[in-house]
Amino acid sequence: MLNVILKPLIDFVVNTISKSGYAGITLLMGLESANIPIPSEAIMPFSGFLVSQGQLNFWWAAFFGAFGCLLGSMASYALGYFGGENLVRKVIKKYGKYVLVFEYELDEAEEWFRKYGDPVTFFSRMLPVIRTFISLPAGIAKMNFSRFCFFAFVGSFLWSLPLTYAGKILGENWGSLGKYFHKFDIAFVIAFFLMVIWYVRHKLKKHRAYKNK
């Protein structure tokens, strides 16, 4: 199952950003924040690699990563705001399993929102998995939209910056790995696969543990 999920996911991320640049970053990060778990831990480092190759600008890559998050978060917020909790749960129950989205993850996001209120919209942007779903309970709770957008964008920008920088540094230092690799791009491929594998394995492991409770 892992290989079935990984290959199309990796191909989609790489092809989208390679062909579409900033628009591709915006699209992918938007999908992630609209509850489609395409890991930003893979999207932004690959963008950083393209920065190191002179194909993208570092600050613009991070900006469009955050902007995509904002757009996706707005869509997720609207679903929670206008659809309410019952509709959201019905959609996740019926279709979520096809994109590794599960109802208990919505429960976790709602619990975070109840505990910490509006600020969780900011801080959760820097937490894997939770960041993908936090906009739904924000919409269901009808959080002030202007504050929601502000927290979502700033938190996402602070999340995108280090991920982009990590990809940039890795790309810039490939030359030093030459004695170990015949082709420099092998280094990135390995790192990229490891990040995506960790993300998908984490999701599947968590899901199995929940089912076995």
Image: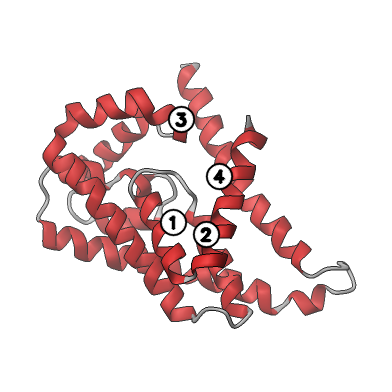
Element at badge 2? Answer: helix
Circle 1 residue: 28
Circle 2 residue: 16
The type of residue carrying mark 1 is Leu
Residue 206: x and y in percent read 50, 31
**3D distance between C-alphas at marks 2 and 3:** 21 Å
**3D distance between C-alphas at marks 1 and 3:** 17 Å
Task: State the quadrant of the N terminus.
Answer: top right
Residues at circles 1 and 2 in contact by the CB criterion of under 8 Å: yes
The type of residue carrying mark 3 is Tyr
**3D distance between C-alphas at marks 1 and 2:** 8 Å
Query: Picture quarter containing residue 30?
Result: bottom left
Whether residue 120 is visible: no
Q: Earlier in the sequence, mark 4 or mark 2?
A: 2
Residue 82: x and y in percent read 12, 40
Element at badge 3? Answer: helix
Circle 3 residue: 98
Q: Earlier in the sequence, mark 4 or mark 3?
A: 3
Circle 4 residue: 199
Q: Earlier in the sequence, mark 1 or mark 4?
A: 1
Q: Earlier in the sequence, mark 1 or mark 3?
A: 1
Crowding at dot 4, Cα within 10 Å, few <14 / some 14-19 / many 20+, comes out as: many
The type of residue carrying mark 4 is Tyr
